Image (tube, rainbow, N blue to C red):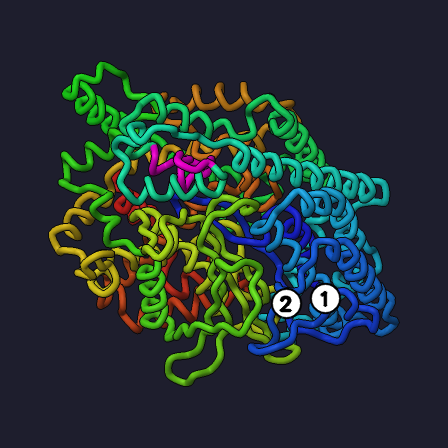
Amino acid sequence: MRQFTTLIASALCGAALISCSSTTPQSSVSATPAAPEPVAAAKPSNPLLANWAGPYGGIPAWDKVVIADFKPALEIAMEENLSAVDAIAKNRAQASFENTIAALEKSSRTIDRVGTYFGVWSNNMNSPEFQAVETEMAPVLAAFGDKITQNEALFRRIEAVYNSPEKATLTPEQQRLTWVYYTNFVRSGARLDAKAKARMSEINQELAGLYTTFGQNVLADEQGRYLTIDSEADLAGLPQSLRDAASAAAERKKLTGKWVITNTRSSVDPFLTYSDRRDLREKAWRMFIMRGDNGDEHDNNALIPQILALRAERAKLLGFETHAHWRLENAMAKNPERAMQLMEQVWKPAIGRVAEEVADMQKVADSEGAKIAIEPWDYRYYAEKVRKAKYDLDQNDVKQYMQLEQMREAMFWVAGELFNFKFTPIANVPVYHPDVRVWEVNDKTTGRHIGVWYFDPFAREGKRSGAWMNAYRNQERFDGEVTTIVSNNSNFVKGKPDEPVLISWDDASTLFHEFGHALHGLSSNVNYPSLSGTSVARDYVEFPSQLLEHWLPTPEVLNKFALHYKTSEPIPQALVDRIEKASTFNEGFATTEYLASALIDMKMHLAGSTPIDSKSFEKETLDALGMPKQIVMRHRPTQFLHVFSGDGYSAGYYSYLWSDTLTADAFEAFEEGKGPYDKEVAKRLTDHVFSIGNTVDPADGYRAFRGRDPKIDALMRKRGFGK
């Protein structure tokens, strides 16, 4: 049995994933399927229940998924799991690691497989038919998880192993796993009395339903609202690649001869950057920032105070001051005060930089005779003009060298240099959509099979926005050698058929970021699935992914893979130099829009049981912080999927900044050595960060890699803020 609260979130709330770059963060981590084991005779009639068969240790049968099978598969898998757990709890033999902890690791094979199908389908192939199942099963799955964590006999056995003198004879990894089980059961209410446990389960079921509704509302606004452009003259300023993408989006909506800007970041941000039509920029901006806040049937404002109140009540039941204190207890930060201290250290220099950026943009607007004051829908547009003026750098010029397929090859090459991985395309596996492609991952030297990587790069109806990593199956070896299966999912916009998809520099960074999560999973070298891969503290999980972003701008990558889409010529060194010179450009904007969301998240959850009105809290808190009027939060509360579609990043959005502190400090270890491809430093990184999962305390793992604790100085240098 893995961590069931995580499994429930993964299946229902999009938390079966880890997502986003430091500049485009989106979501969380899941428990994932382990090795197959025999199942009951009745199962083969429902393909979702069957063991994964085929090559590579078995693969998911995406070609056999039928939405009508989800509910019965979940019901059978839950029943099987509860039966297995009950047998462990009632075992008359003295509790031991093998008959309790290890047995629990084996007990959830079927529900893990079904949960993977369910979670991946929810994030990538969501439809009204599927949403009906999702809504019905959300509270059922929450109640199922509580039946396990509230099983008194089971907890007594876990506690007995945890407190046994024989624990000292276990391996360090076994001791860590025992601690993880014990801690998670206690944090889930295992010590509560019967009345409190009953209320805890009611809360979890209510939250599961609210999370599902919240996410479905955001998806409805992203799919149901879009900006239609009727005249080619209204495309003024847009590069051809964006025009082609908008035309293709219109064709998909049967709007022939028109252009459509969809209500997703991958479509809206480029439009805000290049469109000369200020009125249309404002329309696109308002459409995007008002997701979940339109006063209709998909409005999320009423859900937020309900979620906050239930979380506050749950925290009190568990003996914590607030939800934030409960969430951070077993994170690296340990408490909200430390997280707030870090954010406040960065907030002041960030908004100071914004003032400088706005002044520069206002000068450009004034010089053009625009007679405007910079507004949020102007920021990206005039920032791009300032970038050109200050650094002679046009992001559209850079984009000509950023082909999606070449950047994917660049990631493979970096993985080969740092981790000795080789990626080979395979076509003999089923996928859930024609856009999905698959690669086998092997050790370059020995040929040993490492795992399988799925790539789903393009936006479509029914797919959540953003970018993320999934683990379909975690690496393990305690019950036989099991290799991992991971995926990366993005929302790039397709252009014309048979033409390369060009992406921005920021998009390429995001691609590397998500691939860093995948490499974290692929590098795993542990025994037990609950400790495998990305199953680490929330404010540590973004460290490996954010670190990998540093390899995109290395000369080795740019010279080999940043090739012009027409001429195949490598990106000119003069352009690379300008990219490097402008590396901290607009950092005030990027840091402030992110930090505003992180601070609102933390402050909402530090309010405890105080009733909160979403709109007024947002305004009053941002006013008190001195939020620049030219910027909005990256994720306003009504669309904040990280925080309100599951517990994953609730009171934890600060994690990106916490992890980036480690990231900046860690990359300087390479710079202090022989450079980004220093084999010795890369081996330390693999041995003490990427391969160990949650087998050690992350702070200890980092110290083993770096030789000391991280310092904030590198973060401030990276963002161009000084000390």
Q: Which residue is mark 1?
A: 47
The residue located at (61%, 43%) in the rendering is 647
Q: Residues within 10 Å of mark 1 (few under 14, many from 20)?
A: many
Question: What x and y, as percent, mark residue 60?
Answer: 62, 67
Work out which quarter of the rendered image holds the N terminus and state it.
Answer: bottom right
The quarter holding residue 308 reads top right
Looking at the image, the residue that sits furthest to the top is 371
Residue 123 lies left or right of residue 36; in this view the side is: left
Q: Which residue is mark 2?
A: 61
Q: Are marks 1 and 2 in contact (CB under 8 Å)?
A: yes
| Amino acid of disc 2 | Ala
Question: What x and y, as percent, mark residue 311?
Answer: 67, 36
Q: Residues within 10 Å of mark 2 (few under 14, many from 20)?
A: some
Question: What x and y, as percent, mark residue 485?
Answer: 54, 68
Residue 662 shows in this picture: no
Residue 430 against residue 146 in the figure, above or below: below
First to last magenta residue range: 255-271
In the image, is residue 593 part of the stretch drawn in magenta? no
| Amino acid of disc 1 | Pro
Question: What x and y, as percent, mark residue 280?
Answer: 36, 25
